[in-house]
Image (cartoon, rainbow, N blue to C red):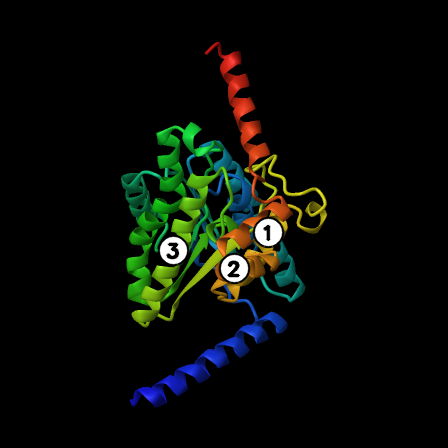
Amino acid sequence: MNIVVEFFVVTLRVLWAFVVAAARWLVRRPEKSVAGQVCLITGAGSGLGRLFALEFARRRARLVLWDINAPGNDETAGLVRHIYRQLAEEAVAAARKAGHGEEEVLPHYNLQVHTYTCDVSKRENVYTTAERVRKEVGEVSVLVNNAGVVSGHHLLECPDELIERTMMVNCHAHFWTAKAFLPKMLELNHGHIVTVASSLGLFSTAGVEDYCASKFGAVGFHESLSHELKAAEKDGIKTTLVCPYLVDTGMFRGCRIRKEIEPFLPPLKPDYCVKQAMRAILTDQPMICTPRLMYMVTFMKSILPFEAVVCMYRFLGADKCMYPFIAQRKQATNNNEAKNGI
């Protein structure tokens, strides 16, 4: 094709992409079904991971829960089983009302949840556990890379091993899980990979260099993988990047922006964050930032001079917003050391 003609076609496609994106903001798309599909969630023992598990359970997905915290993981599994029982009871009641027998309904709700203790920072542990999942449960259709940690130290005070762990859990683990489960998705041209990153993977702040670097890495990995799937014309495999603002899970307890601004930009409620992310996943939305103001912040950070960004950060109180959080972590560490006689 002549390059001038091709350029004209590309321009039209870009404009059409804007139209489609705008339409998605205005018109609610129907959600796809994940009933009966195997959904694997890392970091499922608490926080957002647990809430993702409950949301997928309500949609009748078969759950595979990974976490290094076995008791927390088992607790999540118990909550999932409770949801499965409710679904089965509702189905039986509906069947009886329609004049059908229980045996016609129960097989469709024979859902199970499987728990695995896995340290996603260890490559071989991921590969070994993934092989167990394939043998004991089946092939994974939905992969939710959610596990995350934060060190809570200024760079020069942060032990090297904590920096390495942050990078391993928040970034490197995405490589290992993708390499474990993507081959079958490619073979079937079916699947969905979800990367739970952070707004701190799109723009940064002071005091959490390791966390920002790991989330920037996760975002870069996700975007590159998405392009690779497009280049391979594997349109049956969807990807969704989740970048929430500060979520009130306790992970960043103490983080504060300017008090006059805080009422307009409070920490997100975990339930709200996960429900927004689920809607994006089930409508095959490539990326979701919550709240929507984060799109504007990311755009402005991309076009403004660095010194202008610094001025904005200082006005919002975002330049040192992590300092109270780090101070609390440091105080807690000192108290534990004193209690243990260290």
Residue type at numbered disc 2: Leu
Q: Which residue is mark 1?
A: 312
Q: Earlier in the sequence, mark 2 or mark 1?
A: 2
Percent position (x, y) of residue 109? 52, 56
Q: Which residue is mark 3?
A: 220
Q: Which residue is mark 2?
A: 304
Q: Earlier in the sequence, mark 1 or mark 3?
A: 3
Q: Quadrant of the C terminus?
A: top left
Please report the residue visible at 33 percent of the width from the left and 53 percent of the height from the top.
178
Percent position (x, y) of residue 102? 57, 58
SS state under label 2? loop
Percent position (x, y) of residue 278? 55, 58
- Alpha carbon of mark 1 to alpha carbon of mark 3: how far? 25 Å
Residue type at numbered disc 3: Gly
SS state under label 3? helix
From this view, report whether residue 131 is shown above or below residue 7. above
Q: Residues within 10 Å of mark 1 (few under 14, many from 20)?
A: some
